[in-house]
Amino acid sequence: MRKRHTHPTGTRPRAALVPRDCVTGLDPQVLHAEAQASVAALLKEGESANTVRSYASALRYWVAWFRLRYRRALALPLPVPVVLQFLVDHVQRAGGAGAPGAAEGALVHDLPDAIDEALVAGGFKASRGAPALNTVLHRLAVLSKAHQLRELANPIRDPAVRELVRRIRRAHATRGVRPAAKAALTKDPLTAMLETCTDGLVGVRDRALLLFAWASGGRRRSEVAGAVMENLTKVDDKTYLYRLAHSKTDQAGTADNEDAVKPVVGVAAAGLAAWLEASGVTSGAIFRRIRGSKAAEPLADQAVWRIVKRRTALAGLEGDFGAHSLRSGFITEAGRQNVPLKEAMALTGHRSVMTFLRYYQSGAVQSSRAANLLSSPATEE
């Protein structure tokens, strides 16, 4: 006799598992078109706005360059020769006697003038000429990601492309070309910026924002713009604790991440308290636009950049400053004041020691005893 299958409760399962409205069954081996759109929406929502913008810009450039260069629409996967052509079109090299129209040793690249002009006219480039190496490498990374997401053969990983990129990096280093970096806002220039914050409620906000961003470990502009009252705890009149629920190095907002709590103390706490009292902000975004004499909607992350640019200009500071200058300035100052590496990294949230050391060591070397031997008193024999 065949054994009857029963439900764990002891009753026979009902046949109601099949929907009555006859929903079409899906193929488990193929992602449905509507689900593909949902997956894309979830991926986009989980990505930072800055990253989405930079990726979109890079892909638009690839499409425009490819159409102008090959007179056809771009389609993935791209062949390896296309990527090699992209590199020689956009990366400068030392021209020899045989380079058309180039003097001996002049830097040249292969992008035709007509295409260069068309890219500028179409708004895909700001100006004519070869872009910075960082821009080229970013565009390669975006193309690589596009192939990876579609599980296509990736031309960026081809040995010929990887070897050319390696040689390009070496050539630029030999010529003394370094990646562009924003000037660091260490303690002294930051103090000069804070002294300009005397223009009413705007000044109170800018002072609090600059101090919060710098003193809590050099927060990124997206982290400052996204800071909310619900993650802020007041310990006493001289101390706040801010839980960084989401960051570039902790994009999932890990609940048990002890380093997510950032202290805001001393003068930074006083600045924050002054802003909260003056603005009346009690919930939602901490830093907001000022309309009339009242705090209004939350600041966009681009506004953090504009505040830094405005305050450095008002302070008369020379250099190329941006929002990232607060982060690099904090790390550089930590190195200058010999703050233990682990302690400083706990505040910044860096996972990569090598990335952190680029800034930390530039500050530490300035206070190095070895670098000040001529200033040290001579030892008597």
Image (tube, rainbow, N blue to C red):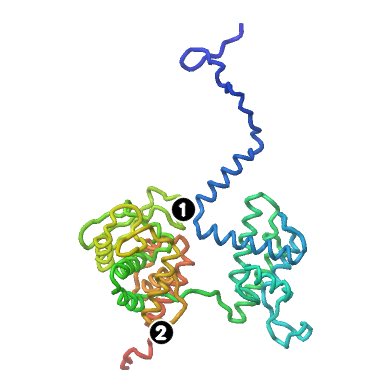
Quarter holding residue 282: bottom left
Query: Which residue lies under the disc numbered 1?
Result: 251
Q: Nearer the viewer, residue 307 or 132?
A: 307
The amino acid type found where label 2 is placed reads: Ala
Residue 55 x %, y %: 58, 59
Write the residue at 26% across / 68% down: 267
Q: Nearer the viewer, residue 40 or 4?
A: 40
Using the rendered image of the protein, determine whether residue 331 is visible from the camera's viewpoint.
no
Q: Nearer the viewer, residue 182 or 217?
A: 182
Mark 1 vs mark 2: in front: 1
What mark, if any, has residue 371 been given in the picture? Answer: 2
Write the residue at 57% across / 11% down: 4
Which residue ends up furthest to the front in the rendered image? 292
Write the residue at 36% across / 80% down: 315
Using the rendered image of the protein, determine whether residue 19 is visible from the camera's viewpoint.
yes
What mark, if any, has residue 35 been given in the picture? Answer: none
Q: Dot 2: what SS?
A: helix
